Image (cartoon, rainbow, N blue to C red):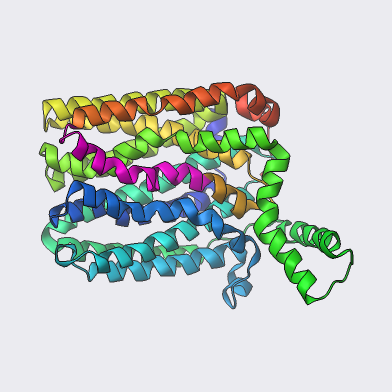
Amino acid sequence: MASYLRLLRDRRLLYIFVLGFASGFPWALIGNTFSAWLHESGLTRTAIGVMGSLAMIYALNFLWAPLLDRIKLPLLHARLGQRRSWILLTQGGILLGTVAISLTDPSAGTLATALAATVIVFSSATQDVAVDAYRIELIPALEPRKMAAASAMTTAGWWTGAGLPGAGAFMVAGPLGWDGAYLCLALLLGLLMLVVLRLPEPETDREEKQAEAELRMREALTGEERPGVAGRAAAWLAVTAVEPFAEFFRRNGWQLAFAILAFIVLFKIGEAFMGRMAAVFYLEVGFTREQIAWVSGFMGWATMLVFTLLGGLVNVTLGIFRGLLIGGITMALANLLFALLAVVGPDMQLFAVAVIVDNFTTAFSTVTFVAFISYLTSRVYTASQYALMASLGNLSRTTLAAGSGAMVDWLDGDWATFFVITTIMVTPGLILLLLIRAALQKRMGDAFSRQRPAPEQG
């Protein structure tokens, strides 16, 4: 514990926490807050699930992530650097979408609301790419234990950004209405952008390594060291769009690479289905907006913050494999408490227990999951490769979970059965993890099984 607390003193982890907050903040706009607003505007559960499928953009951000590794933004890059310039640009898009969505009325028509939400989601998905690349480049691979601590800090920041402002929105939506709540969130985002301006830019040799790769690609494509414009353009495109993913498959081997990506998709599918319908379930079972804000919002945030930091300690101690296995099992079993709540009704004590247990298991598994894909990411193609794995990890939450509302309708509103099904959904992912354990152990070494408490620099 003392060694872990010393790790957390590193100022870089504070920067990572701030950007984790920025990454989670858009979910205060399009998560439970959005679902509750749509529900109170008269939309059906199926319609809310379909509207939530706008978040599938998160699962596609790997398609344009390579541009964040290569394109330098005019004016902003010279002052802020590669990572911060993209972060600030995307936050401007989120701010624009937030103000726009506050001016819409879902009960009168969902088109304008959907368009504004799309701006928020696209900007947020792009911000995630830049934020994750920033975090991984800030902590070098030679500091594996600090990488585990960084995973805890970014997760703590994410849940703070997603939970605390969202809880505040539930509280102010009563006196100010949902449009007023969204305007308050827009003001908070503006303050966050000022903080980003003060953060340092990570130091990396990414550009030199990419230039070397582009030179090799030019010679491979044209047979010339100094090809014409077409040859240079083809080499730039190949290094930007193809090489990041080709390098991932070469380094891991085709079979293990596909197995890793499949596990990433399956790991949190049960949690995703449960999370998409959580706000609707709370309202339908009989809780008020204020009760949801205090228990799922404020109390949920506080417990999540503590459990996330403890999850980092466990990850440093036990290693990634045990963290993924234990986290996956407990995360799924926590859903059974919500099944019990569906049977018992709006019992505040049971509600609090369910939220605390759910937050503990989610924090535990998320910290390990973030560390897992961070270790597998190349520092030369940071944005591209992490975005590929993170977007697949978000696939269940952003795309597959769009059918969660339709599932509840198909079950005639039987929430207890719904939560039991989400518990069973974890099984395929855990079986796959056991099957590829030996290959991952060979690939990742001590980081996969157990961290060694060797002293590190920084």
> Is residue 35 shown above or below 299?
below
What is the x, y in percent for residue 154? 48, 46
Q: Is residue 406 left or right of residue 252?
A: left
What is the x, y in percent for residue 135? 57, 50
- Residue under the image location 22 percent in, 64 percent down: 110
- Please name the predominant secondary structure of the magenta segment in the image: helix
- Residue under the image location 78 percent in, 70 percent down: 232
Counting labels gives 0
- Residue under the image location 19 percent in, 33 percent down: 411
From where the camera sits, is residue 127 visible?
A: yes
Q: Name the image quarter holding residue 297.
A: top left
State the extent of the magenta-drawn residues as a range: 390-414
**Quadrant of the frame with the C terminus:** top right
From where the camera sits, is residue 298 visible?
A: no
Q: Say whether residue 72 is magenta.
A: no
Q: Say whether residue 411 is magenta.
A: yes
What is the x, y in percent for residue 256? 64, 32
- Residue under the image location 55 percent in, 68 percent down: 85
Q: Residue furthest right?
A: 224
Q: Is residue 378 left or right of residue 220?
A: left
> Is residue 46 shown above or below 174?
above
Task: From the viewer's side, name the closer residue of 411 and 327.
Answer: 411
Q: Residue furthest front?
A: 410
Q: Is residue 330 left or right of residue 5?
A: left
